[in-house]
Amino acid sequence: MDLSKTINLVLIRGGGDLASGVAHRLRVSGFKVVMLEIPEPRVLRRSVSFASVVYENSIEVENVRAKFCENPDLIIEFLEEGLLPVIIDPEANSASKLKPVVMVDATMSKTKPKTVPFNPEFLIGLGPGFEAGVNADAVVETKRGLDMGKVYYRGTAAINTGIPGEVCGYSSERLLRSRASGTFLPHRDIGDLVEAGDVIGRVNNTEIRASIRGMIRGLIYPGLEVKENEKIGDIDPRGSRASINTISDRARAVGGGVLEAIMHRFFKQGKR
């Protein structure tokens, strides 16, 4: 399988829930997808994030199976087996070898992204930090609202306010943050129903308590070293009505924006 110089291969930097929504949408649309991650992903929505394979070796999200690929030379073999390979490559060095026509930067750094040692024909950036026509060819809006999933071919996505979108009237209250620096040890798990005030876990000897009632939707992996005030989880106030095993509406919308951008670039008016 020669993947060079074909739009069938899309390289995605990042493997969190938004990146995974993008990867899933592209994969079921017929694209070959390879994801690049860091050695210790700070992924919260572990049950629907392909980055989880770094810790668990493999994961299936809505009938798409991803697998950790320790040896980049096995990427082609994984793809031929119908798998979605995830490799450790924070600097995107493998891009020079794979030579993807399309690359998606889904690192969600919200600041000016790092440059990569390869310039793809079409680079799509997710959210703040990217400007279409400057450091990306297209930018997809990630902020909740009427423009969520919108594609910009000039300009930028909405600025990062640091305030998460509202769910059932709750915003920042949904987040779980560390109150100290140290090792995170959970007392509860994703999918657990909790009440306001319940102890969710500890960082060293400092407790982390829920601010609201609901279902734990996201939680970083146990044993990770965290910094004070670092986001380590979130609670869905919809409680038992929430789902931890399905891709979010936000991730689907962003994935749709990426798919639209690719189709617009390569298939508009019969280009390819």
Image (cartoon, helix red, strand yellow):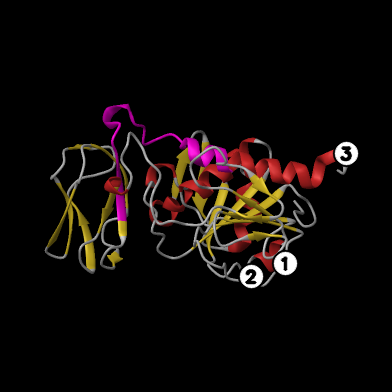
- Choose between 81 and 94: the one closer to the eye: 94
Label 3 – label 1 distance at C-alpha: 24 Å
Disc 2 + disc 1, Cβ < 8 Å: yes
- The mark nearer the N terminus, 3 or 1, is 1
For this orientation, the residue located farthest to the right is: 270
Disc 2 + disc 3, Cβ < 8 Å: no
Could you say which disc has been placed on residue 173 in the image? none
Q: Residues within 10 Å of mark 1 (few under 14, many from 20)?
A: some
**Horizontal and vertical percent for residue 36?**
55, 59
**Horizontal and vertical percent for residue 262?**
72, 46
- Image quadrant in which the C terminus is located: top right
- Image position of 97 (left or right of 193): right
Residue designated by label 1 = 119
Q: Amino acid at mark 3?
A: Gly
**Horizontal and vertical percent for residue 53?**
44, 52
Residue 240 drawn above or below residue 94:
above
Q: Residues within 10 Å of mark 2 (few under 14, many from 20)?
A: some
Image quarter of residue 100:
bottom right
Residue designated by label 3 = 270
- Choose between 95 and 194: the one closer to the eye: 194
Residue designated by label 2 = 116
Residue 48 drawn above or below residue 70:
above
- Whether residue 103 appears in this view of the structure is no
Q: Amino acid at mark 1?
A: Asn
Residue 127 drawn above or below residue 24:
below
Indicate the secondary structure of the residue bearing disc 1.
loop
Q: Residues within 10 Å of mark 3 (few under 14, many from 20)?
A: few
What residue span does the magenta drawing correspond to?
Answer: 232-254
Can residue 19 be found in the magenta stretch? no
Residue at 68% of width from left, 60% of height from top?
136
- Whether residue 21 appears in this view of the structure is yes
Q: Amino acid at mark 2?
A: Val
